Amino acid sequence: MLDAATPLELERHRPYLLRFALLQLRDKSAAEDAVQETLLAALQGAARFAGQSSVRTWLVGILKHKIIDSIRKTARAVPVESRVAEDRAEDAEAFFADDGHFAEAPGEWASPDRSLEERRFFEALERCLQALPKSTATAFTMRELLGLETEEICKELGISPSNCWVMLHRARLSLRACLERTWFLAGAPKAG
Protein backbone atom coordinates (compact mmCIF):
# COMPACT_ATOMS: atom_id res chain seq x y z
CA MET A 1 0.00 0.00 0.00
CA LEU A 2 1.26 3.52 -0.76
CA ASP A 3 1.90 5.91 2.10
CA ALA A 4 0.74 9.50 2.59
CA ALA A 5 3.40 10.76 0.14
CA THR A 6 1.49 9.15 -2.73
CA PRO A 7 1.31 12.20 -5.03
CA LEU A 8 5.05 12.89 -4.67
CA GLU A 9 5.93 9.21 -5.05
CA LEU A 10 3.86 8.99 -8.22
CA GLU A 11 5.02 12.31 -9.64
CA ARG A 12 8.69 11.33 -9.55
CA HIS A 13 7.91 8.62 -12.13
CA ARG A 14 6.40 11.11 -14.62
CA PRO A 15 9.56 11.57 -16.78
CA TYR A 16 9.99 7.81 -17.22
CA LEU A 17 6.29 7.32 -17.97
CA LEU A 18 6.34 10.19 -20.47
CA ARG A 19 9.31 8.69 -22.34
CA PHE A 20 7.54 5.32 -22.41
CA ALA A 21 4.29 6.86 -23.68
CA LEU A 22 6.10 8.98 -26.30
CA LEU A 23 7.79 5.88 -27.65
CA GLN A 24 4.42 4.21 -28.08
CA LEU A 25 2.23 7.09 -29.20
CA ARG A 26 4.71 9.33 -31.03
CA ASP A 27 2.62 12.36 -30.12
CA LYS A 28 3.65 14.55 -27.20
CA SER A 29 0.15 15.74 -26.40
CA ALA A 30 -1.32 12.22 -26.47
CA ALA A 31 1.58 10.92 -24.38
CA GLU A 32 1.13 13.67 -21.78
CA ASP A 33 -2.61 12.93 -21.64
CA ALA A 34 -1.96 9.20 -21.17
CA VAL A 35 0.54 9.87 -18.37
CA GLN A 36 -1.81 12.30 -16.67
CA GLU A 37 -4.65 9.77 -16.85
CA THR A 38 -2.29 7.11 -15.49
CA LEU A 39 -1.28 9.21 -12.49
CA LEU A 40 -4.89 10.13 -11.79
CA ALA A 41 -5.94 6.46 -11.96
CA ALA A 42 -3.04 5.55 -9.66
CA LEU A 43 -4.09 8.18 -7.12
CA GLN A 44 -7.67 6.96 -7.23
CA GLY A 45 -6.58 3.32 -6.94
CA ALA A 46 -3.72 3.73 -4.46
CA ALA A 47 -5.59 1.72 -1.83
CA ARG A 48 -5.60 -1.28 -4.19
CA PHE A 49 -1.82 -1.22 -4.67
CA ALA A 50 -0.64 -4.26 -2.72
CA GLY A 51 3.08 -3.64 -3.11
CA GLN A 52 3.73 -6.94 -4.92
CA SER A 53 5.66 -5.02 -7.57
CA SER A 54 7.53 -1.75 -7.68
CA VAL A 55 5.51 1.44 -7.99
CA ARG A 56 7.05 2.04 -11.45
CA THR A 57 5.98 -1.41 -12.66
CA TRP A 58 2.47 -0.79 -11.36
CA LEU A 59 2.33 2.61 -13.08
CA VAL A 60 3.60 1.19 -16.39
CA GLY A 61 0.86 -1.45 -16.21
CA ILE A 62 -1.75 1.29 -15.86
CA LEU A 63 -0.06 3.36 -18.57
CA LYS A 64 -0.17 0.45 -21.04
CA HIS A 65 -3.96 0.41 -20.75
CA LYS A 66 -4.13 4.18 -21.23
CA ILE A 67 -1.90 3.91 -24.31
CA ILE A 68 -4.12 1.21 -25.79
CA ASP A 69 -7.15 3.44 -25.16
CA SER A 70 -5.39 6.30 -26.95
CA ILE A 71 -4.46 4.07 -29.88
CA ARG A 72 -8.08 2.91 -30.13
CA LYS A 73 -9.29 6.51 -30.34
CA THR A 74 -6.69 7.38 -32.96
CA ALA A 75 -7.27 4.24 -35.02
CA ARG A 76 -10.98 5.00 -35.29
CA ALA A 77 -10.23 8.51 -36.52
CA VAL A 78 -7.76 7.55 -39.32
CA PRO A 79 -9.22 6.13 -42.55
CA VAL A 80 -7.92 2.66 -43.47
CA GLU A 81 -6.83 3.86 -46.92
CA SER A 82 -4.32 6.29 -45.42
CA ARG A 83 -2.82 3.57 -43.20
CA VAL A 84 -2.38 1.21 -46.16
CA ALA A 85 -0.80 3.94 -48.31
CA GLU A 86 1.54 4.91 -45.48
CA ASP A 87 2.75 1.32 -45.08
CA ARG A 88 3.49 0.93 -48.79
CA ALA A 89 6.06 3.71 -48.53
CA GLU A 90 8.56 1.29 -46.98
CA ASP A 91 9.91 -1.26 -49.47
CA ALA A 92 11.41 -4.25 -47.66
CA GLU A 93 12.54 -5.93 -50.88
CA ALA A 94 15.61 -3.71 -51.00
CA PHE A 95 17.11 -5.79 -48.18
CA PHE A 96 16.98 -9.06 -50.16
CA ALA A 97 18.70 -10.54 -53.21
CA ASP A 98 16.77 -12.42 -55.92
CA ASP A 99 17.45 -15.75 -54.18
CA GLY A 100 15.67 -14.56 -51.00
CA HIS A 101 18.81 -14.17 -48.90
CA PHE A 102 19.99 -10.86 -47.49
CA ALA A 103 21.49 -8.68 -50.21
CA GLU A 104 24.18 -7.64 -47.75
CA ALA A 105 25.14 -9.74 -44.73
CA PRO A 106 24.12 -8.15 -41.44
CA GLY A 107 26.98 -6.62 -39.52
CA GLU A 108 28.44 -8.13 -36.37
CA TRP A 109 27.00 -6.77 -33.15
CA ALA A 110 29.56 -6.23 -30.43
CA SER A 111 27.40 -7.28 -27.49
CA PRO A 112 23.61 -7.07 -27.85
CA ASP A 113 23.03 -7.95 -24.19
CA ARG A 114 25.19 -5.10 -23.00
CA SER A 115 23.70 -2.68 -25.54
CA LEU A 116 20.19 -3.43 -24.34
CA GLU A 117 21.18 -2.23 -20.89
CA GLU A 118 22.39 1.10 -22.08
CA ARG A 119 20.14 4.11 -22.14
CA ARG A 120 21.67 5.39 -25.37
CA PHE A 121 20.60 2.22 -27.13
CA PHE A 122 16.98 2.90 -26.23
CA GLU A 123 17.36 6.46 -27.44
CA ALA A 124 18.64 5.10 -30.77
CA LEU A 125 15.75 2.64 -30.87
CA GLU A 126 13.31 5.48 -30.22
CA ARG A 127 14.78 7.52 -33.11
CA CYS A 128 14.52 4.48 -35.39
CA LEU A 129 10.90 3.90 -34.35
CA GLN A 130 10.10 7.54 -35.11
CA ALA A 131 11.46 7.07 -38.63
CA LEU A 132 8.91 4.30 -39.33
CA PRO A 133 5.48 5.06 -40.77
CA LYS A 134 3.19 5.78 -37.82
CA SER A 135 0.91 2.75 -38.24
CA THR A 136 3.89 0.41 -38.67
CA ALA A 137 5.52 1.77 -35.50
CA THR A 138 2.22 1.51 -33.66
CA ALA A 139 1.75 -2.13 -34.65
CA PHE A 140 5.34 -2.92 -33.63
CA THR A 141 5.10 -1.25 -30.23
CA MET A 142 1.73 -2.82 -29.54
CA ARG A 143 3.22 -6.25 -30.26
CA GLU A 144 6.73 -6.01 -28.87
CA LEU A 145 6.46 -3.44 -26.09
CA LEU A 146 2.86 -3.75 -24.97
CA GLY A 147 2.70 -7.51 -25.54
CA LEU A 148 -0.59 -7.57 -27.45
CA GLU A 149 -1.52 -10.54 -29.64
CA THR A 150 -2.00 -10.16 -33.40
CA GLU A 151 -5.79 -10.41 -33.09
CA GLU A 152 -5.87 -7.54 -30.59
CA ILE A 153 -3.63 -5.38 -32.78
CA CYS A 154 -5.80 -6.04 -35.83
CA LYS A 155 -8.92 -5.15 -33.91
CA GLU A 156 -7.45 -1.93 -32.52
CA LEU A 157 -5.94 -0.76 -35.81
CA GLY A 158 -8.71 -2.04 -38.07
CA ILE A 159 -6.36 -4.13 -40.23
CA SER A 160 -6.25 -7.72 -41.42
CA PRO A 161 -3.86 -10.29 -39.89
CA SER A 162 -1.94 -10.41 -43.18
CA ASN A 163 -1.49 -6.64 -43.15
CA CYS A 164 -0.40 -6.80 -39.51
CA TRP A 165 2.23 -9.46 -40.23
CA VAL A 166 3.57 -7.44 -43.15
CA MET A 167 3.73 -4.31 -40.98
CA LEU A 168 5.55 -6.18 -38.21
CA HIS A 169 7.96 -7.72 -40.71
CA ARG A 170 8.70 -4.33 -42.29
CA ALA A 171 9.14 -2.76 -38.86
CA ARG A 172 11.66 -5.41 -37.80
CA LEU A 173 13.62 -5.09 -41.05
CA SER A 174 13.66 -1.32 -40.91
CA LEU A 175 14.58 -1.23 -37.24
CA ARG A 176 17.36 -3.72 -37.80
CA ALA A 177 18.80 -1.68 -40.67
CA CYS A 178 18.43 1.57 -38.75
CA LEU A 179 20.04 0.20 -35.59
CA GLU A 180 22.90 -1.31 -37.54
CA ARG A 181 23.49 2.03 -39.25
CA THR A 182 23.00 4.31 -36.26
CA TRP A 183 24.05 2.18 -33.31
CA PHE A 184 25.95 -1.04 -33.89
CA LEU A 185 28.13 0.03 -36.79
CA ALA A 186 28.30 3.74 -35.97
CA GLY A 187 30.72 3.54 -33.10
CA ALA A 188 28.37 2.52 -30.30
CA PRO A 189 30.21 1.96 -27.04
CA LYS A 190 32.01 -1.36 -27.10
CA ALA A 191 31.33 -3.90 -24.40
CA GLY A 192 34.20 -3.88 -21.97
Image (cartoon, rainbow, N blue to C red):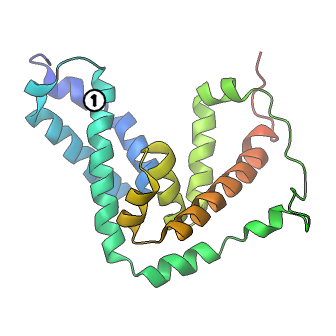
User: In the rendered view of the protein, which quadrant contains the C terminus?
Assistant: top right
Quarter of the image for residue 147 reads top left
Observer able to see residue 27: no
- Residue 115 lies left or right of residue 155; in this view the side is right
Provide residue 175's location: percent of width, then percent of height.
Answer: 67, 52
- Residue 9 lies left or right of residue 72; in this view the side is left
In-front residue for pair 157/31? 157
> Which amino acid is tagged 1?
Trp
Q: Residue at x 53, y 58 (%)?
A: 137
User: In the rendered view of the protein, which quadrant contains the N terminus?
Assistant: top left
Q: Give the total of numbered labels.
A: 1
Provide residue 36's location: percent of width, then percent of height.
Answer: 22, 46
Q: Residue at x 45, y 71 (%)?
A: 159
Provide residue 63's location: percent of width, then percent of height.
Answer: 30, 42
Q: Residue at x 29, y 20 (%)?
A: 53
Q: Which residue is mark 1?
A: 58
Observer able to see residue 57: yes
